Image: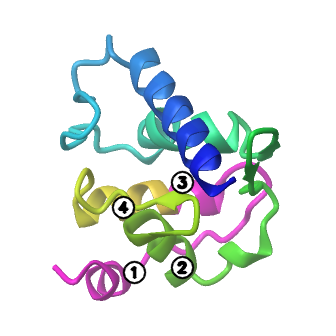
Amino acid sequence: MKGLYLAACSLLFLTGVQAYAQDPQVSAPGQHFEQREGEHLFKAICQGCHMAQGQGAQGAGAYPALANNPRLSADAYPVFMVAQGQGGMPGFKSQLDDEQIAAVVTYIRTHNGNTFNQPVDMATVKALTGR
């Protein structure tokens, strides 16, 4: 079942990347994303699995809701998930630099019903990416 989940998420991820292929600041899958804004990174990387309003989904796998998610209150948790991944969630450390990880996590924490308005601490990002 985990393999099916990863395949479905990968397909959704690639679909999201294809949707933004016209954006010259976003590169091809497996390469570094050039976009710097959290919203654009969310749309290119996250919304394929977590949906446009971060509501999550059920289907070939379970895609947790990011909207109104109290687990996002501490920035270390979403930074770890975006950078390293866990379970069916792939890590994006090789495609995003530390500033991009901070930007997308800050966006997730401040949109779709989340009101964690403190920007992500770069020391936390650096500690969790090892860079």
> If the image is split into quadrants, where does the C terminus sit?
bottom left
In primary-sequence order, the first of circles 3 and 4 is 4
Identify which amino acid the numbered label 2 is placed on: Asp
Q: CA distance from mark 3 to mark 4?
A: 10 Å
What is the CA distance from the residue labelled 3 to the residue labelled 1? 13 Å
Q: CA distance from mark 4 to mark 2?
A: 11 Å
Residue occupying image coordinates x 74% and y 47%? 61
Q: Earlier in the sequence, mark 4 or mark 1?
A: 4
Q: Is residue 5 above or below residue 110?
A: above
> Do the CB atoms of the residues marked 2 and 1 lie less than 8 Å apart?
yes
Range of the magenta residues?
A: 106-131
Which residue in the structure is indicated by mark 1? Answer: 121
The crowd level at tag 1 (other Cα within 10 Å; few <14, some 14-19, many 20+) is few
Query: Is 6 left or right of 55, judged from the image as shown?
Result: left
Mark 3: amino acid: Tyr
**Which three-letter amino acid code belongs to the residue tagged 1?**
Asp
Pick the front one: 14 or 24? 14
> For the view shown, which residue lies furthest in the top direction?
22
Q: Amino acid at mark 4?
A: Ile
Residue 55 in the figure: left or right of residue 124: right
**Label 2's element?**
loop
Measure the alpha-carbon separation of dots 3 and 2.
11 Å
Circle 4 SS class: helix
Residue 130 lies, in percent from the top left, at 21, 84
Q: Residues within 10 Å of mark 4 (few under 14, many from 20)?
A: many
Residue that mark 2 sits on: 75
The answer for how far apart the CA atoms under marks 4 and 1 are is 11 Å
Instruction: Out of 17 and 12, give the one closest to the viewer.
Output: 12
